[in-house]
Amino acid sequence: MTYRKLQELGLKHGTDKATSHSYLQIYAKVFDLLKLTDKNIRILEIGAGDTGASHKMWAEYFPKADVFCIDPFHLGAQNKNLKEELKLFGVNVFQGNQLSRDDLRSFIKLYGADFDVIIDDAAHMPDAIQISLGCLFPCLKNN
């Protein structure tokens, strides 16, 4: 059930997690327990891509969740519109670079810690992954 719903929403919003990468099968297993709980969860995904598709998917899949996005949004007017579009979906948007520890610390200062889920789908570079992991791993809830 969880996978079908995620797949449906992923295709609806156009995330490559539902098509070429097939990540939703893995996410469905991991997020099954979160979906069953009636608590307000906090999800951070780093990287909005061109359309913010997966953030929109998370916001719809977890209607009670607080969904957060960190992205540099440096591609001009198109991404300015994307920031506003994500806000309309209820996504908390932070303009920052995952390669900047200062940006990540500013995000934490603004939005706090205690995330249930953190997904890194941004720069796909070892440096960026290590910096994000080092700064944000302590922000994950226990368990």
Image (cartoon, grey):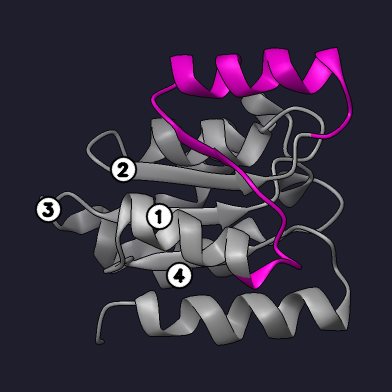
Where residue 60 sits: x, y (%)? 41, 30
Where residue 61 sits: x, y (%)? 40, 38
Q: Residue furthest left?
A: 38
Q: Secondary structure at mark 1?
A: strand
Labels 1 and 2 touching (C-beta < 8 A): yes
- The structure residue drawn at horizontal position 70% and vertical position 41%, both measured from the top left corner, is 48
Query: What amino acid type is highlighted by mark number 3?
Result: Lys
Instruction: Give the magenta part as a residue range.
Output: 74-101
Query: What amino acid type is highlighted by mark number 1?
Result: Ile
Query: What amino acid type is highlighted by mark number 4?
Result: Lys
Q: Secondary structure at mark 4?
A: helix
Left or right: 68 in relation to 123: left
Q: How many marks?
A: 4
Where residue 101 sits: x, y (%)? 63, 72
Residue 101 visible somewhere in the drawing: yes
Give the residue pinned by disc 4.
29
Q: CA distance from mark 4 to mark 2?
A: 20 Å
Where residue 91 sits: x, y (%)? 44, 32
Q: Which mark is residue 66?
A: 2
Query: What amino acid type is highlighted by mark number 2?
Result: Asp
Magenta stretch: includes residue 12: no
For disc 1, the neighbor class at 10 Å (few under 14, some 14 to 19, many from 20) is many
- The structure residue drawn at horizontal position 45% and vertical position 45%, both measured from the top left corner, is 68
Magenta stretch: includes residue 93: yes
Q: Which mark is residue 43?
A: 1
Give the residue pinned by disc 3.
39
Dot placed on the residue nearer the N-terminal end, 3 or 4? 4
